[in-house]
Image (cartoon, rainbow, N blue to C red):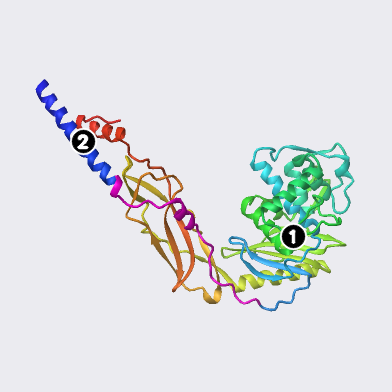
Amino acid sequence: MERKNLALLCAGVVCFWLFALAFGTAQGNGLRQQSPAVQAAADQTQPVQPAAAQPALELPCRAACLIDQQTGTILYEKNADQQMPIASITKVMTLLLTFEAVHDGRIAMDTLVPVSEHAYHMGGSQIWLEPGEQFTLDEMIKAICVSSANDAAVAVAELVGGSEPGFVQMMNARAAELGMVNTTFHNACGLDTEGHLSTAHDVAIMSREILNTCPEVLHYTGIWTDTLRGGATQLVNTNKLLKRYNGITGLKTGTTSGAGVCISASATRDGLDLIAVVLGSLSSSERFTAATTLLDYGFAAYAAVPLPAMEDRPLLIKVKGSAEESVPLDYTALPETLLMPKENAAALTAQLDLPQELEAPVQLGQTVGTVRILSGETQLGEYEVRAAADAEKMDFGTAFGLLWDALTGCEN
């Protein structure tokens, strides 16, 4: 028996050295691994389908901008980069920073918001807060979104930023991060203040950000009427499109003598999400007329076309030179739909570019292939396929361990 075991051990050693020699050769002559520079060059691209020619819309406002919420593509613009006051649409940034603070765990929706003397003295639209009075953050956000309450907006700003000036610094920093290059905030509520300016395009950018990252805001912007103080304070939504426009979801109105009558309106139909910004109308009816015209144009001219199902796409890819035989594939970079002009909305096809196998090491999130979406011969977008797990490179010790386990019948 001892002689038999000795022979088995000798045979194992010989096999091991043969395996090690072959393994080393494979490492030198295996599949070429994509370099980080090449991987970076394969970043996904936005759809390149050209936008439809902009028609001559009659819009009773100083400036306007219509964008697709998913991609940020500008579908229509009028004086979209001209600086002007934006009134209470300012509160979109106030709400964005507030929801981000909730997401970060710094505050919660049941956090009590104190009312300072400064917040109490806010003019314009308000819920008549009293110094020392407290509401939950949920109630304050409701007052901001439904009734556009300036006092509530400033009280929340003081909670999140420590003071309104400190919060304003946060607003301007966040605007810079979002690329709102023509925006400067001086307060948290939008009351006319010298130098407190933005543009229709910048408003569209921050509206898109809050809708994409804080969709819970729609719970509040969709409220038509509600109450506070046990029914003593009535809240009525200032966005009358909630009762007039099919698919409207929000977002924020604004009116001051300096800004005129404004709105950032969000709406959804047939999987297409649009944001229409209207600044500087002369009346509330003209504001809603301009927003309706923009949204009607967008929904009539564009479609959110579903991507091909790709039901036969591989879910795993083989890995060479690793203890892992394969890694799963991550296709989440692909959007569910692509924005296209309806006149060009032909059936889409998908082309998957993926190697037969990868060479270790493979890192979680590494780009391993691409999916190209085409309409006829026109490429609309290219999206990354990524590794959904790690596969470490097999070293000498791991190789010996695997061989030993195979020879002795042991399993880890």
Residue 207 pos. (x, y %): 68, 57
Residue at x 75% of width, y 44% of height: 139
Q: Give the magenta part as a residue range.
A: 27-54
Q: Which amino acid type is shown beneath numbered disc 2?
A: Trp
Residue 17: mark = 2
Which quadrant holds the N terminus?
A: top left
| Quadrant assignment, res 201 | bottom right
Give me the C-alpha separation between circle 1 and circle 2.
Answer: 68 Å
Q: Please tell me which residue lies in front, 26 or 380.
A: 26
Residue corresponding to mark 1: 182
Residue 267 higher or lower than 317, as above or below: below
The relative height of residue 21 versus residue 206 in the rendered view (above or below) is above
Viewport quadrant of the C terminus = top left
Amino acid at pointer 1: Asn
206 left or right of 38?
right
Query: Is label 2 in a helix, a strand or a loop?
Result: helix
Q: Residue furthest top?
A: 2
